[in-house]
Image (tube, helix red, strand yellow):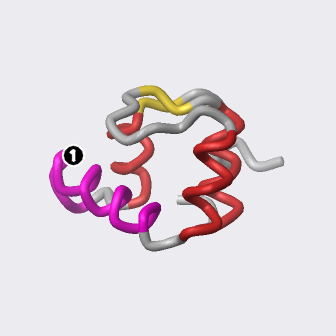
Amino acid sequence: MNEASFKVRAYGYGELAQLYFPNISKKSATWQLRRWIVSDNNLCLSLSNIGYKKGLRLLKPSQVQLIIDTFGEP
């Protein structure tokens, strides 16, 4: 495995958002990731089943895995 590969671990919500959107502000990246998540009903349901709620600041590795399974690695 390449050292630069994405690592599934706990991420701050803004931290993960900035990996997906590195060229915009953290606040804008956070809003954009939120828009992506809420636009996918299956992802929203799967995330809520493992404890995700709007406003959550720390994503568990299992939640990060669902996000990258849906959108790909950042």
Q: Residue at x 58, y 27 (%)?
A: 10
User: Which of the 4 image quadrants contains residue 16?
Assistant: top left
In-front residue for pair 56/26: 56
Q: Is residue 20 above or below residue 52?
A: below
Residue projecting furthest to the bottom: 39
The residue sitting at 40% across, 38% down in the picture is 13
Q: Position of residue 72 (x, y in %)?
A: 63, 66
Question: Eyeballing the image, is 71 above or below 22?
Answer: below
Residue 36 falls inside the magenta stretch: yes
Residue drawn at point x = 61 percent, y = 61 percent: 43
Percent x, y of residue 7:
67, 39
Q: As displayed, is residue 30 above or below residue 61?
A: below
Q: Tell me which amino acid carries mark 1.
A: Lys
Dot 1: within a 10 Å radius of its alpha carbon, few (fewer than 14), some, or many (20 or more) residues?
Answer: some
**Which residue is farthest right?**
1
Q: Which residues are magenta?
A: 23-38
Residue 63 located within the stretch drawn in magenta: no
Q: Does residue 15 appear left or right of residue 4 in this picture? A: left
Q: Quadrant of residue 51?
A: top right
Find numbered disc 1 in the image and state the secondary structure of the residue it sits on: helix
Q: Identify residue for label 1.
A: 26
Residue beneath the point at 34% across and 65% down: 35
